[in-house]
Image: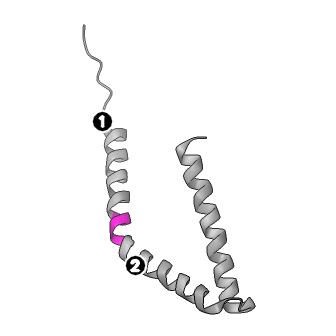
Amino acid sequence: METSTLKRTLAWILLAGFVLLLLNISIFHVLIVPSVALYAIIAIFFVFSKPRLARESKKITATTERQETEPDVEKNK
């Protein structure tokens, strides 16, 4: 399995888990204290990781743009 496919699959699984967590907090109320604690941990991680993720995506975008704009130069032998 490719790395990008694995990352995409993991992202979907995490998204589904997060939606289930929100449903539990708002509707089902099963183990509400641990659910709210987990939600708070995820929210804190998101707030503190956002600048790092923005830097990484900016690096990827800059690298991709550079690759697209650089002309293909063949070496003479």
Q: Mark 1 points at which residue?
A: 70
Q: Residues within 10 Å of mark 1 (few under 14, many from 20)?
A: few
Q: In which quadrant is the N terminus drawn?
A: top right
Secondary structure, mark 1, is loop
**Magenta stretch bounds:** 50-54
What amino acid does circle 2 point to?
A: Val
Q: Name the residue under label 2.
A: 47
Q: In the rendered structure, does residue 23 fall within the stretch colored magenta? A: no
Q: Residues within 10 Å of mark 2 (few under 14, many from 20)?
A: few
Q: In which quadrant is the C terminus drawn?
A: top left
Question: Left of 51 or right of it: where is 39?
Answer: right
Residue drawn at x 59%, y 87% as measured from the top left: 34
Residue 45 in the image: x percent, y percent? 43, 76
Residue 30 in the image: x percent, y percent? 71, 89
Q: Quadrant of residue 20?
A: bottom right
Distance in Å between CA atoms under marks 2 and 1 = 36 Å
